[in-house]
Image (tube, grey):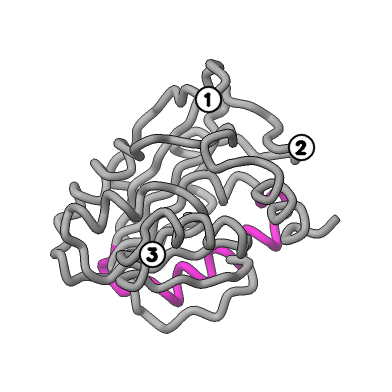
Amino acid sequence: MNAKVHWEHIYETKSPTQVSWYQEHAQLSLQFIQKTGVGKTDHIIDVGGGASTLVDDLLTTGFQHITVLDISATALKQARERLGARAADVDWIEADITRADLPHQAYDVWHDRAVFHFLTQADGRQQYIKTVRHAVRRGGHVIVGTFASDGPDHCSGLEVMRYNPASLHNEFGAGFELLDSARETHRTPFGTGQKFIYCYCRKH
């Protein structure tokens, strides 16, 4: 089963609030985005945003140029339906991030919660980082959240990578300055805890 088929199946058979990564509000992500100091007219991309509610809160906060990218058309449809008329204020991209053709230096903030850790092959991670380098402007901000080194080793039936802040930063390399990191214990809809780490970098 390829990645797109897998994720379409997940979103077709579960409601957005029944997946393990569901958050009513992505509070830590919002805090990091606000910490960047970007203006309301700067450009933000949420990679793997799917049916996440982060876009709702970004719109409510007043951000005007938001892109949500996800491999699953079903997840994006769920988000658009939830937003109603506000969905027209968002750019929606259905794509595999390791194959996505994004515009050059278009984004001031790149946010990814729980996509990068699914890239278990080095070539996939390298392509992802190549896309970040291409799509994020110089001096832009990169916020990536993954399972921590003591987090789950599988999710949604798939093997995942686990990181600490140093090892995640090392994947991106010297062109990205690590400004901050944080740990989070995410409470799933099923009452279990998942350990995450977030890295916030500036692209040089």
Secondary structure of the residue carrying numbered label 2: loop
In the rendered view, would you say 66 is above or below 192? below
Question: Is 180 placed above or below 97 here?
Answer: above
Q: Earlier in the sequence, mark 1 or mark 2?
A: 2
Type of the residue with mark 2: Gly
Mark pair 2, 3: CA separation: 27 Å
**Element type where label 3 sits in the image:** strand
Q: Are marks 2 and 3 in contact (CB under 8 Å)?
A: no
Q: Which residues are magenta?
A: 119-140
126 drawn magenta: yes
Determine the residue positioned at 72% across, 61% down: 4
Question: Disc 1 marks which residue?
Answer: 189
Nearest to N terminus: mark 2 or mark 3? 3
Q: Of label 1 and label 3, which has the lower sequence position? A: 3
Q: Is residue 204 visible in this depiction of the protein?
A: no
Report helix, strand or loop for mark 1. loop
Q: Position of residue 69 (x, y in %)?
A: 50, 65
- Where does the image place residue 28, in percent across and percent down from the top left? 31, 37
Q: Residues within 10 Å of mark 3 (few under 14, many from 20)?
A: many
Residue type highlighted by circle 1 = Pro
- Tell which of 3 and 92 is nearer to you: 92
Q: Is residue 93 above or below residue 18?
A: below
- Report which quarter residue 198 is drawn in: top left
**Left or right: 163 as drawn, with respect to 159:** left
Instruction: Name the disc covering residue 107, or none.
Output: none
User: What residue is shown at x 20% (from left), y 53% (from top)?
Assistant: 60
Name the mark on residue 157. Answer: 2
Q: Which residue is mark 3?
A: 45
Task: Give the amino acid at mark 3.
Answer: Ile
Measured in 3D between alpha carbons, the distance from the residue under mark 1 to the one under mark 2, in whole angstroms, is 17 Å
Q: CA distance from mark 1 to mark 3?
A: 26 Å
| Residue 3 place in picture, x, y as percent | 74, 57
